[in-house]
Amino acid sequence: MTSAIIRLRRPMLTVTFDGFSRTAATLGAAALERVEARGTFYAGPTLDAGVDRFDGAALTRLIDAGHEIGCMLGGEAPRDACARTAIELALMGLRQPPRTAAFGRPDADSAHTAAALGFECARASAARLNVGRANLMALGSFPFESWAGAEPLLATLKEAERRGAWMIVRMRDVAQGDGAPGAPLGALGALLLKARALKFDILPMSAAADRVRAAPRARAA
């Protein structure tokens, strides 16, 4: 099932981290856990280059806490990159292969690649809410990189609540201090608290996709 009708009784929010760094694995995870939520952390050898990456201990802690580990698709050979990522994650302690993928390009080829690789859903980079008819292999998402981006995200959150949509937010780093790169920790906390106030379910990618498939109005393409 790659296509579905999304119209939810309770809106959903998913927070994702791309090629995730140590700050994502620590500060980002903790922010989610403070509101009793979990997120999806995407790993990939190509996009992790130059990033202060998570280690095996951080990966184990994320898994034990209930967060989801996914595969970041990138480069000229996504199938090979995905295979390398799966092996690396298994060696670091991931007991089951990733169920979901993320990619930076919203084109159809990337969606087809994610489906061919057997992923259950995939997150793209087009900034849109997932509501109505949606391709589960090219789900829209919104970047979160600075304080300036926080206010538009809060407005989009209200729109998602009104429309019964699935909203996905993506980031790389989480910044604790002013001027540091990444989504500001305080702004991330504010977004999560607002989502809770609006009665959002805050779920990892695979759990949210399962919710969509189980909805009475969902149907395969």
Image: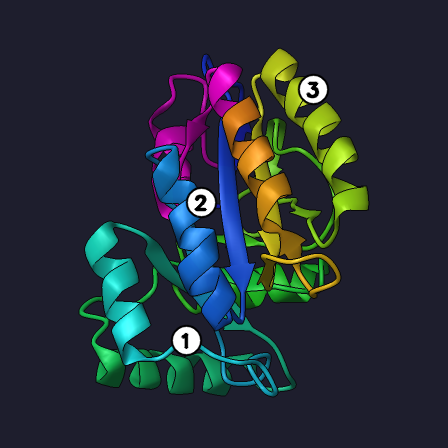
Q: Residue at x 59, y 87 (%)?
A: 49
Upstream in sequence: badge 3 or badge 1: 1
Helix, strand, or loop for circle 2?
helix
Helix, strand, or loop for circle 3?
helix
| The label number, if any, that marks residue 54 in the structure image | 1
The residue pinned by badge 2 equals 31
Q: Is residue 76 above or below residue 116?
A: below
| The label number, if any, that marks residue 149 in the structure image | none
Upstream in sequence: badge 3 or badge 2: 2
| Region of the chain picked out in magenta, as a range | 195-221
Upstream in sequence: badge 2 or badge 1: 2
Residue 201 horizontal/vertical position (percent): 42, 26
Residue 187 horizontal/vertical position (percent): 64, 40
Determine if the magenta segment contains residue 198.
yes
Q: Residue furthest right?
A: 148
The foreground one among 180 and 104 is: 180
Q: Are marks 3 and 1 in contact (CB under 8 Å)?
A: no
Circle 3 crowding by C-alpha within 10 Å: few under 14, some 14–19, many from 20:
some
Q: Is residue 130 visible?
A: yes
Question: What is the C-alpha distance between the residues marked 3 and 1?
Answer: 34 Å
Q: Is residue 124 visible?
A: no
| The label number, if any, that marks residue 159 in the structure image | 3
The quarter in which the N terminus is drawn is top left
Q: Are marks 2 and 1 in contact (CB under 8 Å)?
A: no
Helix, strand, or loop for circle 1?
loop
Front tag of 3 and 2: 2
Q: Is residue 148 left or right of residue 209?
A: right
Front tag of 3 and 1: 1
Determine if the magenta segment contains residue 123.
no
Q: Residue at x 24, y 52 (%)?
A: 65
Q: Is residue 191 left or right of residue 197?
A: right
Q: Residue at x 61, y 33 (%)?
A: 130
